[in-house]
Image (cartoon, coloured by chain):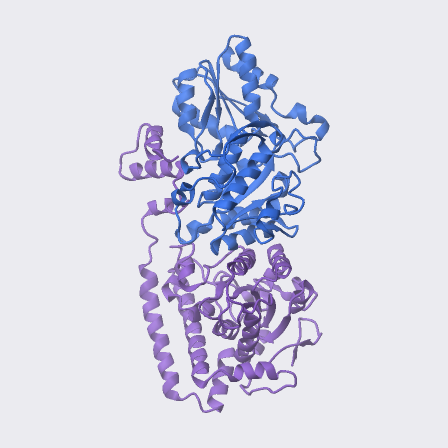
Amino acid sequence: MTTTNGSNEAIPTLQLLDPEGRRVTTRGTKGYRDRAATLTAEDLRGMYRDMVLTRRFDDEATSLQRQGELALYAPSRGQEAAQVGSAYALRPRDFVFPSYREHGVLQVRGIDTVDRLRFFRGSDHGGWNPYEHNAQVYTVVIGAHALHAVGYAMGVQRDGTPLDAHDGTAVITYFGDGATSQGDVNEAMVYATVNQAPVVFFLQNNQWAISEPTTRQTRTPLYRRGEAFGMPSLRVDGNDVLAVYAATQEALERARRGEGPSFIEAFTYRMGAHTTSDDPTRYRTTDQEEVWRRRDPIDRLAALLRAEKELDDDYVAEVQQSADELGVRLRAGVRALDGGAPVSTFDDVYATPHGVVASERAWYEAYEAGDPPADQYAIAETAQGGAR
Amino acid sequence: MTTMAERTRTTSGAPGGTRTLTLGKAVNEGLRAAMRRDDKVMLMGEDIGPLGGVFRVTDGLQAEFGEQRVVDTPLAESGIVGTAVGLAMRGYRPVCEIQFDGFVFPAFNQITTQLAKMHNRTRGAVELPVVIRIPYGGGIGAVEHHSESPEALFAHTAGLRVVSPSTPQDAYTMIQEAIACPDPVLFFEPKGRYWAKGEVDLDAEIGSSTLDAARVVRAGTDVTLVAYGPSVETALKTADALAQEGRSAEVIDLRAVSPMDTATVVTSVRRTGRCVVVHEAPVFFGAGAEIAARVTEECFYALEAPVLRVGGFHTPYPVAKHEHDYLPSVDRVLDAVDRAFAH
């Protein structure tokens, strides 16, 4: 199939599942269809479940923000297939560098739902230990993490890990259409291709960088950026979980085999606002939103499963039950997050003692104890001790 | 995670004994020793491979350690630091070379928003033992962007350590301590002093406790001169000139700008009653302002005169034809000492 890019240019786009949920058998896609065919009905139901849970997480988080329980929230509504489909292609030892909207990826990666909202609650700058799930915390400076992903992949190369489609190690980094304009993303593609690093650049082109449409970022279809840097590049229908899975698996296996980086543009749509602070009515029409609502990635997968008699009402009810439980647990868990004692601000600034932090902490603790020191310096000296 | 103590317990892998080395060669030997000691240590930068860096500080290292450990990077500084962050997350200890001080700014975002904050962002789960070597300072007759002293910009960012050696011995030991440190370290090398020679004990013990400590490099009683990096030599020459006038200057090599060893400075100034800070960076919002504030707080009743600063002006670094008028000279430091005594 083809999609457009804001202009009328037709762009080749891999699609294996059409908006009505029918499998597509276009010529030249057999390799991808074969990959998708390895997904069992149970796998597909699992994807459906994770997509529904991601959407519920989104709705719950948005409500919590409206109730004043979160400082901010960036919804992923509409991007569930791009996120869940790609994350299903990952193996545990692969490493993920997300941007800050990859709630569906984190869902598949198994990161606790409450931990995912610590950042938006204002109780953490991160929220989880990146090494526990091989998934870095969210990065807010747009595109900065793409370089971290490439560096991590360069480390994988130096470790001498097996070069094997299954037992190798790949790195994936997620970013958006706005990020493609950032220098860091472009430098990341330079470093990745020059070093043939095992990394997959996974672009979710959701067509909006806050209020700016993709036409404000590029005149070139974005998947061709990857090509220009010298890596295999592909545009997929980002609302088609099968195409996303197949394309990502192919790219990850290429990386694990030691055959270098790849670029995937998942063409999708941000159905919600940029964040809870945004007002899309100022810059886009409800007509466009309606078009994309009819391409809802969850409805599409559900239609496929229904058509193939692999989704019954009991399973749907069971998933709804899980979603309800997610909501209950999330609401209670988020409200309990308080960020710890104020003095914890001084924790983990450095890995080894730093005299300035130590003396400021000592002063603050004395001040909080109602005993502000007359001689701040004396405290600093004590706090510094042997390790300045 | 291996602790710094464990990493530094082993002795240097470099040929032992004491040798006379230039400061640049001392950094080279320090890098070599660190790379021999720990195979996770790697170097990244522009032209650091066959060329050995524009100042030859990495000379011979790619030949010894190979292209995987001494990496000629693309010409993109943000990429150097950004990929170093990822390499460190994977367990490596990257040492990045920024070719000249004025070229660090494309990497400023990665250094201040990512490298500095990752440990805190992950509540200590991630350590980033990344060293960023920056040849800095003036006096070499260079074109724009090749002579600046941007250390205060980094000292102002929590999460970074900022150090600068002034002698070949310190260059040799401090670069190894910086590499062993689990925190990111900005390692400012006084490029105008790269060719200065000194005795280097290649068996000197590498220990974390000395990386942040200031050192009294000349004892005195009448005034304390505080300097670091290239300005230590200026301060010592000033002390010589003062001695001929019958004034006794104590000279402190600060060695680290973050953290700042205020205790050593304060102890000295409480005794001398006068303090003059010397650095090449502009004095406005410079490290000297921090020293002046802290000394004033802690030595208020011991001070015979206000703390004075001698350094660069609030202008872009001047053209090479004027740089020797801009840089703090012995005469300008003497002028400040005279003003301190006139109070």
Q: Please say if A151 is above or below B8.
A: below
Q: Answer with left or right where residue B134 lies relative to residue A339.
A: right
- Left or right, B261 with respect to A265, comes to left
Q: Position of residue A360 (x, y in %)?
A: 37, 37
> Is residue B111 among the parts visible in the rendering?
yes
| Residue at image point 59% right, 72% down | A267
Nearer to the camera, A271 or A345: A345
Q: Is residue A301 left or right of residue A329?
A: right
Which hue belongs to chain A?
purple
Q: Which chain is blue?
A: B
Hey, which quadrant is residue B330 in on the image?
top right
Total marks in image: 0
Q: Is residue B137 above or below residue B66?
A: above
- Which residue is painted at 29% across and 40% down in the image? A368
Quadrant in which residue A257 is drawn: bottom right
Note whether residue A205 is visible: no
Question: Residue B99: image x %, image y %?
Answer: 63, 42
Residue placed at 31% from the left, 60% from the top?
A336
Q: Position of residue A70 (x, y in %)?
A: 40, 60
* A236 is higher (above) or lower (below) than B168: below
* Residue B187 position in % (x across, y down): 53, 39
